[in-house]
Image (spheres, rainbow, N blue to C red):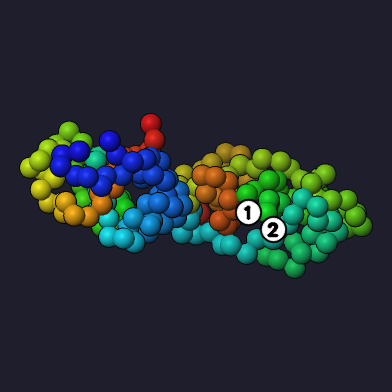
Amino acid sequence: MLGFADVYDYVPGKVDWLAHNLEVEGDDAEATTVGGLMRDDVVRCAPTDHVAGVLGSIKASPYPFALMTSDGGTVLGRLPASALDAGSEEPVEDVAEPGPKTFRPHHSAEHVAKQLADKNLRWAIVTTPEGRLLGVASREDLERAS
Amino acid sequence: MATRIWLEQLEELIERGAQVVEVLGPDDYAPVHLPGAINLPLRQLDRQSTAVLDHSRPVVVYCWDSL
């Protein structure tokens, strides 16, 4: 190719790089994105964890929910504290809300805040394109940064 | 023919000193691009425009996405 012997095509392209929340350069490199506002201390649990134990972890956290993830960290479901029974020994996979709405970290704070407001959601779940959990951001923080 | 790579291989190539080239136009390049990426729009790729590249180092090109 034009005299170059060692040429590679990064197939997934710039969108993939941005979506993994990696460093960038450019005029808008410092723009506020949901990736820049997210926190990574949300409670995570496995599908086989018991509801009562997870509810205890949620109550000790700053969030009103937990996220059920696979061994590899892929988001499988959402567990709002309000829907959990403190005395239940059920596995969380039986009560989790499957397939929650997720965002990529390069999405702008304004865009995500609007999407959350449209769906009456208070929290954004941020994942890689493969679905691996990166963190969560509150609508309040996103609106303040927009 | 360019070898198709994904993120993990890209990061390894950058570690090895690969030159990264964004082939989108300047309006797409200017707002945000990969660190150190050079802008060589696809329609302008020829021997003259690529003279800024080092033939002895790997070259990675990228676009917006896989489409």
Q: Amino acid at mark 2?
A: Arg
Which circle marks residue A73 in the picture? 1
Q: Are marks 2 and 1 in contact (CB under 8 Å)?
A: yes
Indicate the position of residue A96 as horizontal and vertical percent values.
76, 45
Q: Residue drawn at (50%, 47%), measured in percent from left and top?
A: A104
Same-subunit check for callouts 2 and 1? yes
Q: Which residue ends up furthest to the left in the rendered image?
A: B48
Residue farthest along the top direction in this orientation: B67
B21 and A32: which one is in front? B21
| Secondary element type, mark 1 | loop
Task: Locate residue A74, reporting x and y percent.
Answer: 63, 49
Nearer to the camera, A127 or A116? A127
Name the residue rendered at 61%, 42% in the picture: A101
Residue A51 coordinates in the image, percent (x, y): 84, 55
**Placement of A102 over or under A41, stated as above or below:** above
Q: Tag 2, which chain?
A: A
Q: Quadrant of the N terminus of chain A?
A: top left
What amino acid is labelled 1 in the image? Gly
Number of other residues with Cα within 10 Å of mark 1, as a class: few under 14, some 14 to 19, many 20 or more: some
Kindly identify the residue that appears in the image at 56 percent across and 62 percent down: A39
Judging from the image, mark 1 belongs to the subunit labelled A
CA gap, disc 2 to disc 1?
Answer: 9 Å
Tell whether A131 sits left or right of A28: right
Mark 2 Cα shell of 10 Å, populated few (<14), some (14-19), many (≥20): many
Q: Is residue A93 above or below residue A145?
A: above
Can the viewer see residue A4 in this picture?
yes
On the image, numbered disc 2 is attached to which residue?
A44
Dot 2 falls on a residue whose secondary structure is strand
Q: Nearer the viewer, residue B1 or B40?
A: B1
Q: Is residue A110 left or right of residue B23?
A: right
- Could you tell me which residue is drawn at 41 percent across and 57 percent down? A22
